[in-house]
Image: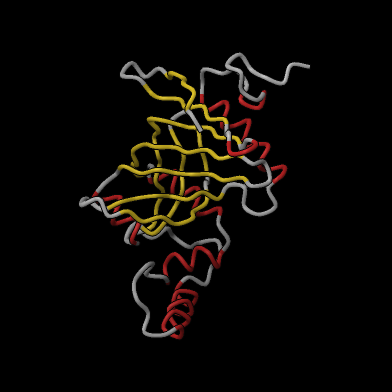
Amino acid sequence: MNEKNSLGLNKCFLDLDDPFKLFESWYEEAKKNEINDPNALALGTATKKGVPSVRMVLLKGYDKNGFVFYTNLNSQKGNEIKENPNATMCFHWKSLLRQIRIVGTLSQVEDEVADNYFNSRAYESRIGAWASKQSSELVNREELIKSLEKFKNKYQDQNNVPRPNHWSGWNLKPTSIEFWLDGDNRIHERLKYKLTANNDWTKSLLSP
């Protein structure tokens, strides 16, 4: 059986011109094999001055237009994105010995999209979006508990909790997507897709 693709890479890289199709293949494998949160990714953002920060978030949707996550728009990452929409994502699936790195530009999702996702969340999570001033300092934990109780009293109907204006989703439209597979003696396999000015994708091999 041929274990390599046309570029001499492991067959898991397939032979595709569309990186989203390859992402879908790897992501489906991760959902079968990764024990916890196969949709977890490291999100890197930076201020306008270029000071970077990174944190884990959860992928909540993707298509040919990009990769979507949700957050408080006034959080640290939200404020950094408002200053500088350039960002990067990294998925690491240890069970598969694979990574995917994505670089691109973030834009806010449409209100209808955000509303639909918000309404699919558990009641406690929707209340938390109102109660938590994400990334701001707390005097003590009791301050947060009281805020949760306040909004539970305000929105007692679990089927009718509106989405806060300060909470929405961001879509990362990629300009490059790199697929990485662990190799023996750190001779890894790397395939990079890059978006051209004509909105076509080119492929190149990268040295480990």
Q: Nearer the viewer, residue 159 or 109?
A: 109
Whether residue 86 appears in this view of the structure is yes
Percent position of residue 139, x then y:
36, 84
Q: Nearer the viewer, residue 78 or 1?
A: 1
Taking the spot 58% from the left edge, 39% from the top edge, the residue there is 186
Task: Give the vertical position of 179 relative to 149 (above or below).
Answer: above
Q: Is 19 left, or right, of 109 in this rendering? A: right
Taking the spot 52% from the left edge, 17% from the top edge, the residue there is 17
Task: Give the vertical position of 135 relative to 121 (above or below).
Answer: below
Percent position of residue 54, x then y:
41, 55
- The extreme left residue here reads 49
Q: Nearer the viewer, residue 74 or 166?
A: 74
Taking the spot 52% from the left edge, 41% from the top edge, the residue there is 61
| Res 108 quadrant in image | top left
Task: Give the vertical position of 161 relative to 185 (above or below).
Answer: below
Q: Is 23 left, or right, of 199 in this rendering? A: right
